[in-house]
């Protein structure tokens, strides 16, 4: 007697959201089953990957992270173009690290000018990510939204402490927002409700549950993402049916395992291979949990994740 895998019909569906504009626009979400559960339903889109670009030359990056971008690392426009032209990036994430009040503390006007230059220079969707300082992000991201009106950017993080300042401007200027909450399903739902009460359409919200690297609490992030997807798909919870975005690159590359050179601890193996695998494994873990968009750094880690995702959906 042959065995047939039972097909499960879910009550809910993840909202499909279009990001960017023009021929290179992409769609995230749309799942009617858990990620890679192709025996239950087709997966409409593989997880999207946004390549990181920084608006200031990064500090304390290991050589493995710098090497692919060393010729453009001091110019965010050239960096973004290299990611697209050489590494076929489908999205770019501009990290506005220079605006950190504890660092360079670049002004909102200057940061917005940089974001505008990058947005004008590329034809793929652009994510603009602040520093999670509520006051500074309120000033910076609202200015970015205004100068990039109509570009359909993705802007964040919007948290409970600043969403009232940023969200109305983002929506008025035609952008999508990232609702960020600290690893808690109830707080994630609450922020989505608050954004809705403020007039933000459901199809303009990405959900960021906050994540971490393998070895540094990824099991908590996985569990929360998994619970969000269970509520969205089996309980038809409309306020948790937003596509999920995970800013994983910075979390993996700041770990000591990614930072320690080979010569300092040969037992850990080759430093570049170790760091690349840490990023790829962390990203793929989150994709399995339910992530729709992954923000990543190293081209080889991205290649590995794309290869694994394609393999999981090819049968």
Image: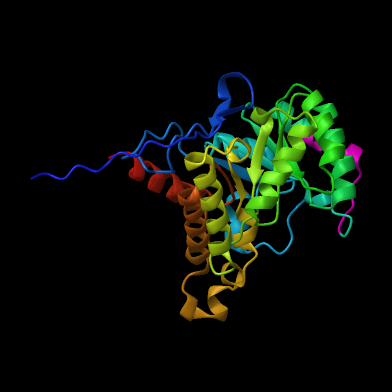
Quadrant position of residue 18: top right
Q: Which residue is drawn at 49% across and 48% down?
A: 287
Residues shaded magenta: 103-115
Q: Does the magenta stretch include residue 65?
A: no
Q: Nearest the camera: 234 or 74? A: 234
Q: Nearest the camera: 13 or 36? A: 13
Q: Residue at x 44, y 34 (%)?
A: 32
Question: Whole-percent x and y of residue 84?
Answer: 58, 35
Q: Nearest the camera: 307 or 158? A: 158
Q: Residue at x 81, y 41 (%)?
A: 163
Q: Does the magenta stretch include residue 110?
A: yes
Quarter in which the N terminus is drawn: top left
The residue furthest front is: 235
Question: Whole-percent x and y of residue 124?
Answer: 61, 29
Quadrant position of residue 90: top right
Specify whether residue 112 is in view: no
Compared across the picture, whether 122 is left or right of 294 comes to right
Question: Whole-percent x and y of residue 258?
Answer: 58, 67
Specify whether residue 176 is in view: yes
Question: Whole-percent x and y of residue 140?
Answer: 86, 41
């Amino acid at each position: 007697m042959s065995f047939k895998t039972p097909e499960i019909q879910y009550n809910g569906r993840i909202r499909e959201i279009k990001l960017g504009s023009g021929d290179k626009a992409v769609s995230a979400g749309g799942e009617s089953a858990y990620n890679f559960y192709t025996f239950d339903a087709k997966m409409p889109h593989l997880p999207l990957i946004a390549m990181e670009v920084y608006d200031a030359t990064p500090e304390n990056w290991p050589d493995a992270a710098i090497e692919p971008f060393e010729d453009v690392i001091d110019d965010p426009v050239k960096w973004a173009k290299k990611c697209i032209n050489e590494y076929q990036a489908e999205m770019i994430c501009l990290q506005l690290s220079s605006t950190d009040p504890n660092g360079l503390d670049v002004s909102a006007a200057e940061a917005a000018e940089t974001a505008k230059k990058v947005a004008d220079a590329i034809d793929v969707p652009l994510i603009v990510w602040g520093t999670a300082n509520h006051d500074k992000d309120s000033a910076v991201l609202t200015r970015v939204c205004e100068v990039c009106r109509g570009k359909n950017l993705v802007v964040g993080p919007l948290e409970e402490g600043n969403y009232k300042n940023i969200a109305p401007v983002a929506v008025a200027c035609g952008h999508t927002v990232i609702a960020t909450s600290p690893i808690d399903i109830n707080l994630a739902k609450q922020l989505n409700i608050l954004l809705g009460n403020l007039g933000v359409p459901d199809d303009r919200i990405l959900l960021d549950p906050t994540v971490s690297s393998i070895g540094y609490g990824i099991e908590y992030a996985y569990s929360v993402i998994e619970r969000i997807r269970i509520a969205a798909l089996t309980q038809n919870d409309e306020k948790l049916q937003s596509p999920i975005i995970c800013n994983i690159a910075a979390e993996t590359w700041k770990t000591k395992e990614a930072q320690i050179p080979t010569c300092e601890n040969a037992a850990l193996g080759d430093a570049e291979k170790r760091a690349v695998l840490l990023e790829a494994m962390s990203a793929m873990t989150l994709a399995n949990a339910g992530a729709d968009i992954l923000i990543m750094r190293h081209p080889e880690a991205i290649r590995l994740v794309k290869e694994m995702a394609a393999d999981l959906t090819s049968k």
